[in-house]
Structure formats: structure tokens, C-alpha cells
Amino acid sequence: MKTNVSKEVVLQAIANVNQKQGYQIELNRSDYLGKWYNFTIKSKSKIPGARVSSSGRNLPKASWHAHGYLFDAIFTLAPNAIIYSFGKKITIENGNWEDMKIGSMMNPIYFSETSIL
């Protein structure tokens, strides 16, 4: 993901989400490229805020819900924020809670169904 806000804003948003939702998300990737701050988030596996694969394996990755709550927290702190995720531009106006189908034809599943709540 990349955004036009600073690392400090993203870290504050992560802290807010962790406190409010009881998650343990943290930064995985963190760097600047020009005016953009690039980041990814992760979570320990088997806990709220993490996700499972489409086959049911526990993953040390942040869930769809964790990403959504984080984007909401960033927009609360910086209403003019722009976030690019999965090639889509996300702003406060167009929202961020768009679910996507993952998996296969034999095992179709949505991102939201892989979240550990």
C-alpha cells in the first residue's frame, strides 16, 4: 500500500486500531518513495486481527477487517489522505470496505471470510 500521509500518522492509526479492536497489528514494510509512504501490515497468527488462507491455514498476516479499520483510523487522523491498495485509489469519499473474491473456482471465498475476529 502507499499513502500521502506520514509514517507517524500510520503508526498512530495502528495504535488506535490495536487499542479499540484488541488487535496486535504492526508494520511489516515501511519506506518512503518520493512523496509516498509505502507500508504493509502484519499480525501474529491465530489471534484477532490475523487471517487464514482460503484453505483454512493460519497466516501471520493482517486481516481484511484490520486493513479496513486501519484505513478508517487514517482518515480520522488525516481526512485528506489518499491510500492506494490493490491498485485502487481509496479516499474518505469513496470508502474502503470493498470486499474481493479470492480463492479458486472450486473453493471461492471472500477476503472478509478469512478474518479472525
Image (cartoon, helix red, strand yellow):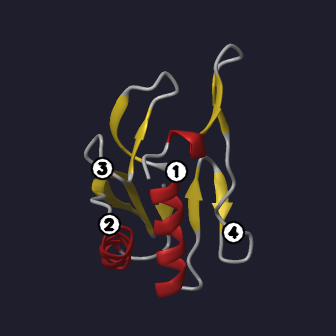
Mark drawn on residue 87: none
Label 4 – label 3 distance at C-alpha: 23 Å
Between marks 4 and 3 in the image, the one whose residue lies nearer the viewer: 3
Question: Do the numbered discs 3 and 2 sit on residues whose CB atoms are within 8 Å?
Answer: no
Q: Residues within 10 Å of mark 4 (few under 14, many from 20)?
A: few
- In the rendered structure, which disc, 4 or 2, sits on the residue that comes first in sequence? 2
- In the rendered structure, which disc, 4 or 3, sits on the residue that comes first in sequence? 3
Residue drawn at x 38%, y 26% is 57
> Disc 2 on helix, strand or loop?
loop
Which residue type carries mark 4?
Gly
Which residue type carries mark 1?
Trp
Q: Quadrant of residue 8?
A: bottom left
x and y percent of residue 117 in the render? Answer: 44, 53
Which residue type carries mark 3?
Ser
Q: Residues within 10 Å of mark 1 (few under 14, many from 20)?
A: many
- Among all residues in the image, which is located at the extreme top? 106
Q: Residues within 10 Å of mark 2 (few under 14, many from 20)?
A: few
Q: Nearer the viewer, residue 103 or 39?
A: 103
Which residue type carries mark 2?
Gly
Mark drawn on residue 43: 3
Mark drawn on residue 95: 4
Q: Which residue is mark 1?
A: 64
Mark drawn on residue 22: 2
Between marks 2 and 1 in the image, the one whose residue lies nearer the viewer: 2
